[in-house]
Image: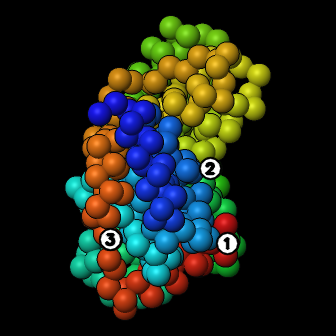
Amino acid sequence: MTKEEMYADIRKWKEEKNAIILAHYYQNDDIQEIADYVGDSLALAQKAAKTDAKIIVFCGVHFMAETAKILSPDKKVLLPNINAGCVMADMITAERLKAYKEKNPDTTIMVYVNSTAEVKALSDVCVTSSNALKIIDHYQKEGKKILYCPDQNLGKYAMKLKGYKFDVWPGFCRIHHNLDCGMVERMKEKYPNASFVAHPECQLEVLEMADYVGSTKQLIEYVTASDKKEFIVGTEQGVLYEMKKRNPDKTFIPLSKTLLCGQMKMTTLKHLYECLKNETNEIFVEENIRIKAKNCLDKMLELS
Ligand code: 13P
Ligand code: SF4
């Protein structure tokens, strides 16, 4: 089957079944092309919370589809490749977080959206890369003790930027964490006129070399609004699809060839096709966990 034939069936089934396809910016280009809506973690969660569709096909990783189910329990939420997880989300478990909470009963648990429903259910407020600084500000101004989990890099970046002090969990995203200052220096030498933009999951030293730090959506908006013509991009290469689409006259260079998330790239057009056709890989969240996790997500949506 050709790509166009697959697209034609997908469009027909979407109509017949009242389904919406949501995709993250790190998805393969052919998925982003057919999706109804492409976004960062926050925008996708907001879209999932508001949609009237009966079926949400979530082209992303497990925690994203789970977040959609938590916010929209009456919808059928499908994950085209059920094995697509997030390495960082697996770096914290409910058991370990419970143990932390027992030792630190008066600490506010701030959880990055890259986490399981069980971990969210134990947390006070959720954040994403696009609203973390704002939400950290809110709790710091109230004088609250905070644990930021599981991404140490965004936590350390917020502390440095704002002069705050709080606990961070030692988790990280391998793809972003592996970037180093030497890579940035070499690329800046090679492309002296380029701006360097980076995702806050990179290490602090790398972020300090960036002209702009933001979520996937914020990075896309920044390069689009900028007068510059060349950009070195410090995040997963999937964002280049939307950057190039919005800015055909600009050049985008990945900071490293290693900037590929194997989990995000696991979902192919064939997975999407089969998933929508057969309505397979449905995501379920146990109701008592869902209600607690929803409180944590609602708090984020309220403060965003
Ligand atoms: P965004 O919320 O910026 O889209 O990031 C999601 C993610 O997994 C980054 O690695
Ligand atoms: Fe998780 Fe990193 Fe992939 Fe984002 S890029 S989904 S944090 S493994």
N-terminal of the two: label 2 or label 3?
A: 2
N-terminal of the two: label 1 or label 3?
A: 3
User: Where residue 160 sits: x, y (%)?
Assistant: 57, 50
Instruction: Give, as a three-letter code, the residue at label 3.
Output: Ile
> Which of pointers 2 and 3 indicates the residue nearer the eye?
3
Say above or below: 275 vs 205.
Answer: below
N-terminal of the two: label 1 or label 2?
A: 2
User: Where residue 73 sits: x, y (%)?
Assistant: 45, 80
Q: CA distance from mark 1 to mark 3?
A: 27 Å
Residue under pointer 2:
161
Whether residue 133 sits left or right of residue 235 in the image: it is: right
Residue at image point 41% right, 84% down: 290
Residue under pointer 3:
283
User: Where residue 225 sits: x, y (%)?
Assistant: 75, 32
User: Where residue 263 sits: x, y (%)?
Assistant: 29, 46
Q: Is mark 3 within 8 Å of ligand 2?
A: no
Residue at image point 25% right, 59% down: 82
The picture quadrant where one finds residue 265 is top left
Disc assigned to residue 176: none
As helix, strand or loop, the secondary structure at mark 1 comes to helix
Say above or below: 193 vs 38.
Answer: above
Residue at image point 43% right, 41% down: 7
135 and 50: which one is in front?
A: 50
As helix, strand or loop, the secondary structure at mark 2 comes to helix
Using a 10 Å C-alpha cutoff, classify the residue at mark 2 as few (fewer than 14 neighbours), some (14 to 19) or many (20 or more). few
Using a 10 Å C-alpha cutoff, classify the residue at mark 1 as few (fewer than 14 neighbours), some (14 to 19) or many (20 or more). some
Residue under pointer 1:
303
Instruction: Give, as a three-letter code, the residue at label 1.
Output: Leu
